[in-house]
Amino acid sequence: MTTRTIRSATPADGEACAKIYEPYVRDTVISFETEPPTTEEMARRIEAALTEHAWLVLESDGEVVGYAYATQHRTRAAYRYACDVSIYLDQSQRGTGAGKALYAALFPLLEKRGFHRALAGIAIPNEASIGIHRSFGFTEVGTYRRIGWKFDGWHDVTWMQLDLGMQEAPSQ
């Protein structure tokens, strides 16, 4: 029987996360990066996300097989209660509920940390990603047309958002 555990990432998870992410960069338009980040760069990203947001990893029998994280949405101060979220899974984990488990752990954590809105930018077409986001209550807010150039073509990005709970004015 497989044992799954979700925990907060550490920079030591950089290698595993970089390995999971590499095929998304190399082979798809799901990521608009064109060069896979190194282990060191991924460790730096994890550390930065943990400072104010969150980065979770999913372990299956002790091996990192997926991750979900939140980062700053925009740099202007008024956006400080919004964050961007993403999930990446080892290919063997797609369709197993791993992504749902990660988001189910991430969203309450973000709400507890005072975030009001989660946003997801999804290169389309990507019905799997649209589907998981809808299953959590995300709604579409718009599509940037022909915004990303990769693999010799333009690609659209649909933005979706989710209210995380805080509806009243935040305490300053």
Image: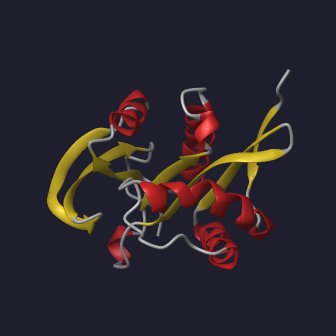
Name the spot of residue 132 as percent of width and height, x first: 43, 33
Give x and y (percent) for residue 41.
63, 78
**Residue occupying the point 56% across, 61% down:** 22
- Determine the image quadrant of residue 72: bottom left
Question: Residue at left 86%, top 43%?
Answer: 62
Depicted 77 relative to depicted 157: above or below:
below
Vertical arrangement, residue 79 with respect to residue 139, above or below = below
Across and down, in percent, residue 108 comes to: 58, 42
Q: Which residue is outermost to the top?
A: 1
Q: Quadrant of the N terminus?
A: top right
Query: In the rendered image, which quarter is residue 144 located in?
Result: bottom left
Q: Nearer the viewer, residue 167 or 87?
A: 87
Nearest to the observer: residue 130 or residue 53: 130
Whether residue 161 sits left or right of residue 154 in the image: it is right
The x and y percentages for residue 153 are 20, 62
Residue in the picture at 48% in, 52% down = 86
Instruction: Give above or below for 107 relative to 47.
Output: above
- Give the residue drawn at x 41%, y 71%: 34
Q: Is residue 56 above or below residue 132?
A: below
